[in-house]
Image: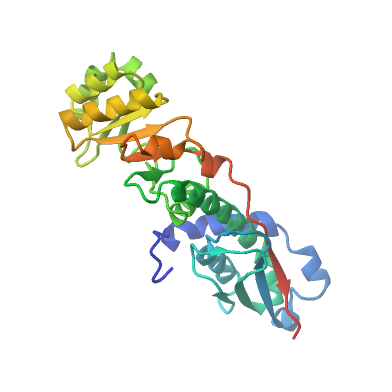
Amino acid sequence: MKGSKYALPHWVVLDRSLQEWLREDIGRGDRATQALGLGDGAAAMQTSQALWIAKADGVIAGLPIAGRVFYLLDQAVEFVPQVVEGEFVRAGTPIAQINGSFDALLSGERVALNLVMRLSGIATATRQFVEKIEDLPTQFADTRKTTPGLRILEKYASQVGGAVNHRMGLDDSAMLKDNHIVAGGGIGPAIAQVRSSLPYPLTIEVETETLEQVAEALTHGADIIMLDNMPLERMREAVQKIRAHNPRVKIEASGNVSLETIRAIAETGVDFISSSAPITRAPWLDISMRFQST
């Protein structure tokens, strides 16, 4: 979206998915719209105005994407947001006005609404986590636990909610988790093997559960150290150890992150806290489309 502070993926990346989702929903044709004589000829050109209304409180995300859905059906459709992307709204707030043919508005309604409801739900849940630590230097990050086919949009919604994106995919950086460490013969050998073939400027992150593993990751030059499922006292000790050894190493905390625990975790001094919860557990934000009398 022009002027948006959020990194909306380019339409070259998104259009193929949007078209596929429209094909899935429309199938052999919109039976109801066609039966009412609104899908063919002059009748299809009849224009109407519809309003999207939030039916619950939440953060709105995905309006530019919804506009693109209608554009792909009919370039003459006008999708006019009534709120700013990322804005928190109350139930009953009009969030978008759509002007165009009955055919396009009815055929695109479900795909567009489904996307915005899903993305707004993620943005709303993410905002709740972010607000718990907004006065602290720690940043909240998402994870790769996303819906297949929707990752790029779900991570966009996470960003709209105030999070920073962790890896988009396995090729973004090298993250050595427990199974990698076992396969590589330990933290040190695994880091050495990965470092020898890692393209510049990708980083190496190492998942640790003990102070001994933290020390080994530091010794072998990990760029980022994840403190996974550590009790708070151990986490504080790990942060102090890392800062004393190399203050440039970034520290991420993960595991057992909830709205009740996130602030205490942030207060240990970590740079990032990651959680899949806002994406994997977020309910959809209910939104309805209502045609206006003309």
Residue toward you, 208 or 26: 208
Looking at this view, name the residue that lies furthest to the bottom.
294
Tell me which corner region of the image, top left, top right, bottom left or bottom right, holds residue 37: bottom right
Q: Quadrant of the C terminus?
A: bottom right
The residue depicted at 75 percent of the width and 64 percent of the height is 30
Visual colour scheme: rainbow
Residue toward you, 215 or 170: 215
Q: List x then y, in percent, for residue 56.
A: 66, 59
Q: List x then y, in percent, for residue 82.
A: 56, 74
In the displayed structure, 56 sits above or below 267; it is below
Q: List x then y, in percent, for residue 36.
A: 82, 73
Looking at this view, name the residue that lies furthest to the right.
35
The residue depicted at 76 percent of the width and 82 percent of the height is 293
The residue depicted at 68 percent of the width and 75 percent of the height is 50
What number of labels is visible?
0
Q: Is residue 217 left or right of residue 234?
A: left
In the displayed structure, 277 sits above or below 89; it is above
Tell me which corner region of the image, top left, top right, bottom left or bottom right, holds residue 24: bottom right
* Residue 247 shows in this picture: yes
The residue depicted at 37 percent of the width and 33 percent of the height is 253
* Residue 176 shows in this picture: no
In the displayed structure, 69 sits above or below 132; it is below
Residue toward you, 103 or 142: 142
Q: Quadrant of the N terminus?
A: bottom left
Q: List x then y, in percent, for residue 140.
A: 40, 44
Residue toward you, 167 or 196: 167
Q: Is residue 223 left or right of residue 169?
A: left
